[in-house]
Image: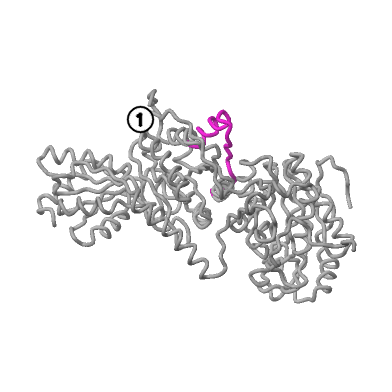
Amino acid sequence: MGERFLMKGNEALAEAAVLAGCRHFFCYPITPQNEVCAYMSRRMPKAGGTFLQAESEIAAINMVLGASAAGARAMTSSSSPGISLKTEGISYLAGSDLPCVILNIQRGGPGLGGIQPSQADYFQATRAPGHGDLRILVFSPATVQEMVDTVFDAFDLAERYRMPAMILADGLLGQMMEPVEFPAVDVTPSPKPWAVGANDGSRPRNVINSLYLQADVLEQRIRERFERYRQVEQSHSRCEEYLTGDAEILTVAYGASARVVRTAVNDARDKGIKAGMLRPLTLWPFPQEQLRAAAARAGAVLTVEMSMGQMVEDVRLYTGGSVPVHFFGRTGGVVPTPAEVLEQIERLNAEGGNG
Amino acid sequence: MAVVYQKPRGLTDAPLSYCPGCTHGIIHKLVAEALTGLGVMDKTVGVAPVGCSVLAYSFFDCDMVQSPHGRAPAVATGLKRVMPDNVVFTYQGDGDLAAIGTAETVHAAARGENITIIFVNNAIYGMTGGQMAPTTLPGQITQTTPYGRDVSGAGYPIRICEMLATLDGVAYAERVSVHDVPSVRKAGRAVKKAFQAQLDKKGFSLVEILSTCPTNWGLDPLESLQWLKDKMIPYYPLGVMKDLTGQGGGQL
């Protein structure tokens, strides 16, 4: 660690990717992630890499597919409507066992929605990032520093498990400026024995492919992939637990909304209410064990999101009806205030936590 | 005994999956012969499309990537940007290249992406059972134009070569055919020239090859070759549409 910089989240993500060994970046302009593209367009030529503004989000993700197939660390960046266009490519990347990193700097939807921060793509990221039986890694940083750190993890795990990774941020995190430090590394990606390229006949032909016309063969490939997913679930779910030890009301929030909730939890504590927060840093795999334990201690759960309630379904799923799970959200680009969240915590507290 | 004919190095031993009489096999052979003739098979990466040639990754004896439908030029772009000294080509049909993948095709060409596209135009969607393609001729009967392609509703066929020739990034665009032996020989020279242009880093090269689909045209193989000659070539004139390769050759 060395010098501290005051940087926008989007720019920090871009710089971190370069330091993490990404030399191939493909994107299409969309608000509120444009700083990623702008930064990369300045940075990549100096790093000896490729910045390419593609003709569409679809082309950009398929350029990522090609670069990844050739063994490179490749990344693309977009925001919600653009991610919808990338879902085709994400499915093919997953079905071809290719790693990559995708940034989603979420904005309000559906449709063109708005350009203010949102967390309404949770379902898309964790449930249906593309057609077919597949999972992708989904990271949910909440600070600019975490965004930087997450980029390294995302590339590393994506390569280790040969699957796409998404960093699910939002317009608030992308646009805000915070002090940040970068690790003093410049990662050289390891060679990929499966990658396509020159072949003098000393190895078998490498074919990157997602097509298996025989159903039993396709099933077998998917089962092998899901065995890797199981390993990811066992080893790589992460969360922060904030004041959960004695918490009677457990809030669950990620990303930008977790910043608001942290303030509300502090305010509740100031009023003598034992509130705490569990903050997933990975949305897939979801930190389900940690959630179950913290929820069992607390007795009541309040999930706060910038959506009409998406992660709350996972919170209910993983707590299995053992505790009442409440929800508070603002959507369409509206960021909840600490006062609004505190009001919810106070209401639950008054109802004895299990209202 | 002298060997007068053999399967070219550059193709695997996998049996081709194409229908009897289909000219995909000839075109595969031309591509393999060009790459082996230039001595670059061992540094070539191909991109297979979605369509009849979806299994092309099984047939070309080099590393291959299977692409989403229409996205082969974007996939090839990603490959080429990582490995600029390798040969990267896509092998695409008319639906893949000129309908769902039009944007990827046009913009790879506009960028002057140093890749080679082998574009097989048989005026129909073969693998899905013979629907109208962007290159289906006016009046041509297909599964989805049962009364013949009516241009008042279904629009007009796209002449890809002519369209791409207007773009500054294109180094070489030629339309050829494989309906008879002289045409096959010319097509082979065009394919080789396109790959040579890529080796010379001239930019985007595309060879459009008029091809047959006896199964979905409802004709036997010989009738299909005749139909190609009589019906397709008048609409899709053969020849060099653009040539900045400096290799010579000129109009056919």
- Residue A65 percent across, percent down from the top left: 56, 49
- Residue A105 percent across, percent down from the top left: 42, 43
Q: Nearer the viewer, residue B82 or A115?
A: B82
> Which residue was labeled with disc 1?
A178
B14 versus A284 height, above or below? below
Q: Is residue B116 left or right of residue B71?
A: right
- Residue A258 showing in the rendered view: yes
The quadrant of the image that shows the C terminus of chain A is: bottom left
A70 versus A270 height, above or below? below
Residue A41 highlighted magenta (yes or no): yes
Q: Is residue A102 left or right of residue A248?
A: right
- Residue A85 showing in the rendered view: no
Range covered by the magenta-colored residues: A36-57
Characterize the local packing of mark 1: few (<14), some (14-19) or many (20 or more) Cα atoms within 10 angstroms.
some
The chain holding disc 1 is A
- Residue B200 percent across, percent down from the top left: 77, 39
Q: Nearer the viewer, residue A300 or A65?
A: A65
Q: Secondary structure at mark 1?
A: strand
Q: Nearer the viewer, residue B21 or B161?
A: B21
- Residue A118 percent across, percent down from the top left: 36, 46
